Amino acid sequence: MQGSGECSWYSVALWGIGAVTVVFHLLRWTLLCWHGIKVYLLSGIWQADLRSYGQWAVVTGATSGIGRAYAEELAKRGLDIVLISRSKEKLQTVAKEIESKHSRQTRVIEADFAEGHSIYSAIVQQLEGLEIGILVNNVGMNYCGVLANFLNVPDPEKRITQVINCNTLSVSQMCRVILPGMLERKKGLIINISSEVGTHPQPLISLYSATKVKHTFMVFVTFFSRSLHAEYSSKGITVQCVAPFMVSTNMTHNIPVNPLIKSAASYARDALNTVGYTTYTSGCISHALQHTALCIVFPGWLRLTSLCVECMEKFALVIEPRVNELMTKMKNKQA
């Protein structure tokens, strides 16, 4: 009888633990599904009025890709735009297009973020007096046109510093420049563009992964964004981190658009819709689903195995001629 009682007690305990576990996971997945519906579906119907943050939006890396798309979408939604990039000619071209299409004011600031600290005093002077409500920290660069081991980067001493200046220093310095004005008005929106490439450590793009993405100990943009939001959300400042997957831009060699790969314009529109719904977003529903699937079928520990790295190195050798060909065509078109 005593043994039967003990067995019954253990059975009840195990049943209770199992029931609690099932309920916990059901609630967790229900909340995740609701969050996804709210962020990626309902946001397409009800969007925040971005003009309420202020008259001007500042966008870095604004002459192509996601940065340009953000600038155009923000202008479309009624904001005047400050474009910051390193090519004055391209800046003027984009500025004229925005003024023509959307009848908004623009200003251009020529600055090469890869140069480091020296550029920011000039940026401060040129932004003086503007009511800046939105900052989009988009500028970024990879250290190589194709996958490459860390020490195989061309001119590594120079390139590594440039990548860190562009991908990391620019985010904190631009926040330092813009945030005081937002605090005075007690409202503002900072959007930091990260990357889903670095959900886990990425061999062969280690420095880009470390500076642009969100894996623990390698994070800068995402953790900085979350920390900054925690510090200043009570003062009316929203800091959102946006982590795209593959978007068709110059950095991705203008890969063809398909259901998984978004155009820059489409991505910027969807990502801006999520403002006010979440402080971290994949930007669009297809990228959110890809992120979830990748974490399940290709987890971080698998990417770091020797076998996986060897396969990636072989893949890099196969695609390098094609990538170089595409880059040559792009340069010829730009010329």
Image (cartoon, rainbow, N blue to C red):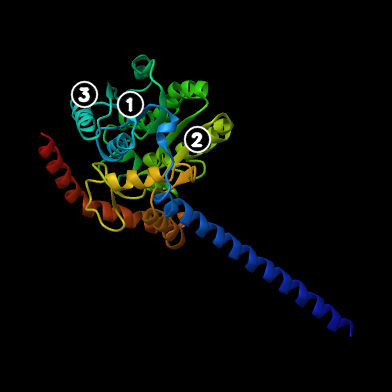
Depth check, front residue: 72 or 302: 72
Residue 116 spot, x, y in % from top left: 36, 23
| Residue carrying label 3 | 88
| Residue carrying label 2 | 238
- In contact (CB < 8 Å): disc 1 and disc 2: no
Residue depicted at 28% across the width and 39% down the height: 69
| Residue carrying label 1 | 113
Residue depicted at 55% across the width and 62% down the height: 30
SS at mark 1 in the image: helix
Q: Residues within 10 Å of mark 1 (few under 14, many from 20)?
A: many
Q: Residues within 10 Å of mark 2 (few under 14, many from 20)?
A: many
Residue depicted at 26% across the width and 35% down the height: 154
Q: Quadrant of residue 68?
A: top left
Q: Earlier in the sequence, mark 1 or mark 3?
A: 3
**Marks 2 and 3, how far apart at CA:** 30 Å
Depth check, front residue: 23 or 172: 23
Residue 128 spot, x, y in % from top left: 38, 15
**Marks 1 and 2, how far apart at CA:** 24 Å
Q: Is residue 317 left or right of residue 198?
A: left
For the C terminus, the quadrant is top left
Q: Earlier in the sequence, mark 1 or mark 2?
A: 1
Depth check, front residue: 94 or 162: 94
